[in-house]
Image (spheres, rainbow, N blue to C red):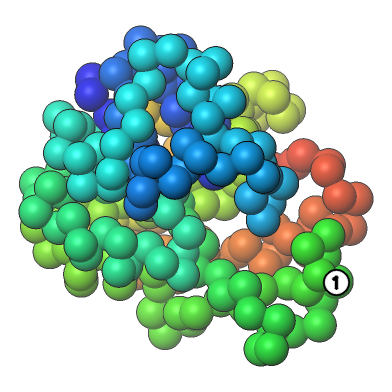
Amino acid sequence: MKIAVLGTGGGARAHIAKLAELGHEVHVGTRDPQATLARTEPDMMGTGPFKEFLAAHPGVALHTFGDAAAASDGLVINGIDGHNAVAALSAIADQLAGKTLIDYAVPYIYNPDIERPWPTPWGVNPILDPCDSDSLGEQIQRALPRTKVVKAFVTQEQATVVNPQAIGGGEHTMFVAGEDADAKQQTTELLKAYGWTDILDLGPLVAARGMEMYAHMHGAIGFALGFGTHFSIKVIR
């Protein structure tokens, strides 16, 4: 397939590399390709310059967000940071029309003036906005009524999403939620290609609220286990 990945951070790179390994034609979207290629410093998460990553993955194409989405033949993965995702995706609504958009963004706000004092390697834990009464996944779906939005991948580090066997032999659970059954099936098939065997459909997109809010719990577990410890969760029936 021709699959678009929007974003160039560490999570997006995990998907780009895995999709290319699986034989897909990968089109990467960024706000400004020339600016992205010109960067020489790590991003806020410590991820190195994208130019180096791109050089190590020949055949991967870099475009604007809109051109990458247009190049996809039906599947787009959203790796745009949560705070800017709705605006960036709304600007390319026509290119996303009729396609499945898998959204794994967490609606974090990285603003030290309003963040709660929860120490992390980056200073303090960011707050979620929206939270509880709405979700980023639902906001994206309302902004893109012609696009089939599926919330998935969000309860795990993306390096583990693309390689579930890295933890516990793959014995953990991945969740999906969305309004369109075919789009959720398409997402499920991609997860199976990644190696997932336990995929739980949570139903409509309102379930994205709990999926996104789990980010705080995931962070709490991570702090308890020690920074850099990789882990996951399993739903025991």
Give 211 or 72, whichever is nearer the viewer.
72
Q: In this view of the protein, can residue 77 be seen by the observer?
A: no
Q: Secondary structure at mark 1?
A: strand
Q: Position of residue 179 (x, y in %)?
A: 21, 57
- Write down the quadrant of residue 56 in the picture: top right
> Is 43 above or below relative to 24?
below
> Is 194 above or below relative to 210?
above
- Write down the quadrant of residue 118 in the picture: bottom right
Q: Position of residue 195 (x, y in %)?
A: 50, 21
- Image quadrant for the C terminus? top right
Judge from the rendering whether residue 169 lies leftward or rightward of residue 72; answer left or right: right
Residue farthest to the bottom, as pictured: 114
Q: In this view of the protein, can residue 218 be seen by the observer?
A: yes
Badge 1, how many Cα within 10 Å: few under 14, some, many 20+?
few
Give 192 or 8, whichever is nearer the viewer.
8
Q: Residue at x 45, y 28 (%)?
A: 16
- Image quadrant for the N terminus? top left
Q: Position of residue 111 (x, y in %)?
A: 63, 79
Q: Amino acid at mark 1?
A: Pro
Q: Residue at x 28, y 44 (%)?
A: 64
Q: Residue at x 83, y 43 (%)?
A: 228
Q: Residue at x 83, y 60 (%)?
A: 121
Judge from the rendering whether residue 3 lies leftward or rightward of residue 93; answer left or right: right
Q: Position of residue 50 (x, y in %)?
A: 54, 34
Number of on-image labels: 1
What residue is disc 1 on? 119
Judge from the rendering whether residue 184 lies leftward or rightward of residue 14; answer left or right: left
Give 180 or 112, whichever is nearer the viewer.
112
